[in-house]
Amino acid sequence: MRIMQNLDKIVALSKNRGFIYPGSEIYGGLANTWDFGPLGVELKNNIKREWWKFFVRENRNSIGMDGGILMNPMVWKASGHVDTFQDPLMDCKDCKHRSRVDKLIEESGTWKDTKKRPEELSLPEMEKFVFDNKIKCPACGKVNWTGIRFFKLMFSTDRGVTEANLNTIYLRPETAQSQFVNFQNLQRSSRLKVPFGVGQIGKAFRNEITPGNFIFRTVEFEQMEYQLFCKEEESMKWYDIYKKKAHEFYTKRLGITDRNIRFADHDNLAHYAKAAVDAEYLFPFGWGEIGGTHHRGIFDLGNHQRDSKKTMEYKEEGQDPFVPTVIESSHGLDRILLATLVDAYNEEEVAPGDTRVLMKLKPSIAPYTVAVLPLQKRGLTDKSHELFDTLSKNFSVSYDETGSIGKRYRRQDEIGTPLCLTVDYETLEDNSVTIRDRDTMKQERIRISDLIDFINRNIV
Ligand code: ATP
C-alpha cells in the first residue's frame, strides 16, 4: 500500500543511502543547497536520458544544444529578467523570518479564490490580503509584518581585470535563453523547417531565500527545457500536443502515478501569451509545480531582435518571412527527481511484524538495474566479479558481498534495484544464478548466458 509518508523519511533515506546530502554539511551547510550522491547522480542521469530520448531524439523535427551558464548581460535585459525577475517578500518584525508573500498566502490555507492564484495578485492586493486575514508568521506564529518589497532573484557576479573595469554578469536563472539567442544558428546548421524544436538540459541559479522543502526549491538546480518554434496559426495545436506530452513523460516514461499529477491552467496570462499551464505533483507538503507548458508568442525572439538588432525572422521559399511563435515545455529536474522518490516510496508488511522499505522506482530509471550478490565470499568472488564485469558493460550494477543475503535484498529494495542476482556454489557447476524480483520477491533460476536478454526484457 502506498502511504503518504512525510518528507523526513525521504530526506533521511536519501542521506543514509546516498541519493542526496546536505550541501557543505561539515561547515554547517548552506541554505537551499544539496549534493547528489552515488545513487542520486544515477537517478538524475536516468531521468535526463529519458527526457532527452522523449523530447529530442525520438522526434524527427527535434535537435539538442548545450548553452553556457554565463551570457552577455544584454540577454537578461532583453528577456525582462533584469527589470522584473523578483519575488514579493515580507519580513516578520518579531523573529525576522522572511516570507515570499504569494507562498505565505497559499500555505496559510486562507486563499479561497479558485479563479485567481495568489501569485497573480498585485503587490497592494497581496499586502492587503496578509494584513486583512491576519496571516501568521510560519516561524514564530506572530502577526507583525513589514510592508511588502521586491527581492531580486538573479545571482550576479563581477567580471573584469581591474576594479574600475567591472562588468556585472549573471548566472542564468533559466536555460531557455540559449535556444532563443541561437535561433538562427540552430535553424541554419540543422536546416530544419518550422515547426522544429530544441531541447536543452542544464543548470540554472536563483537567489531563493524562502525555505526549500528539501530539493524542491534550491538556489542551484537543473532544468530540462524544450522550445518549439512554429507558425502562429498552428501554435495552439502544438501547445495541446506538448501539454499532453508532458503528462506522458511523467506517467509513462518516469512511471509517476497519474492521480498524483495535475495540470493547473494559468488564468491571468502574460500579455504576449495565449495559454500557460503548470504541471503539479502532490508532494507530502502539498501540490507543487514540477514543470509547465507555455505559449510564449514571439515575446522572446521579438525582444532579442529588437535589442540585438539581428533578425530573428524565419524565411521559407515562396512565403513572407516571419518571427516564429514559441511553445515552451519546461521541466525542473530536481523537483521531478523528488517526485519520483516520493512516488516510489513504500513500506510493505511482508510478514506479521516484518516491514520492508520498498522504493518502487520504474525499473528503467532505478539507480542500479541489477545487484550481484555472492552468497558467500569464500570461493565465489572470482565468478561474481566476472559477472559484474560482463553486466556492467550494459547496465548499472551494484556489487554487495557483506551481510546476510536477506539483509542485502532489503538494502537493494530500499534503493529500488529491480533485480538481484545471487551467485552460489551451484553457479560454479551449472553457470546459472538465482534472480530475484524486487516487487514480487519471486526467485527463479536462470542461465548466465540468458541474463542480458532477461534483464533487457524486465527493465522497460
Ligand atoms: P516557482 O513558482 O515554484 O518558484 P517558477 O514558476 O518560477 O517556480 P519556472 O520559472 O517556470 O518556475 O521554471 C521552470 C521549472 O524549473 C519549474 O517548473 C521548476 O520545476 C523548476 N524550478 C524553478 N525554480 C526552481 C528552484 N528554485 N529549485 C528547483 N527547481 C526550480
Image: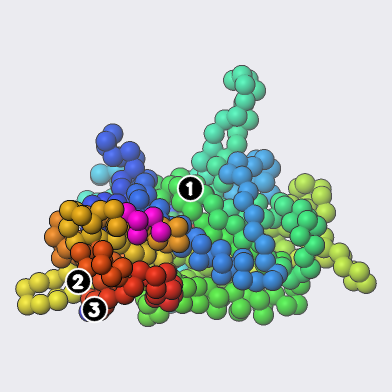
Classify 314 as above or below 38: below
The kind of residue tagged 3 is Lys
Residue 357: percent from left, percent from top: 20, 67
Queried whether the magenta region covers residue 388, the answer comes back as yes
Check disc 2 and report its element: helix, strand or loop: strand
Queried whether the magenta region covers residue 252, the answer comes back as no
Q: Main secondary structure of the magenta part?
A: helix
Q: Which residues are magenta?
A: 385-390
> What residue lies at 13% left-to-right and 60% top-to-bottom?
404
Q: Where, by quadrant of the figure, is residue 409 drawn? A: bottom left
With 25 as the anchor, is 459 left or right in this view?
Answer: right
Q: Is mark 3 within 8 Å of ligand 1?
A: no
With 51 as the anchor, is 328 left or right in this view?
Answer: right
Q: Is mark 1 within 8 Å of ligand 1?
A: yes
Classify 366 as above or below 223: below
The residue labelled by disc 1 is 206
The kind of residue tagged 1 is Arg
> What residue lies at 60% left-to-right and 41% top-to-bottom?
70
The residue labelled by disc 2 is 347
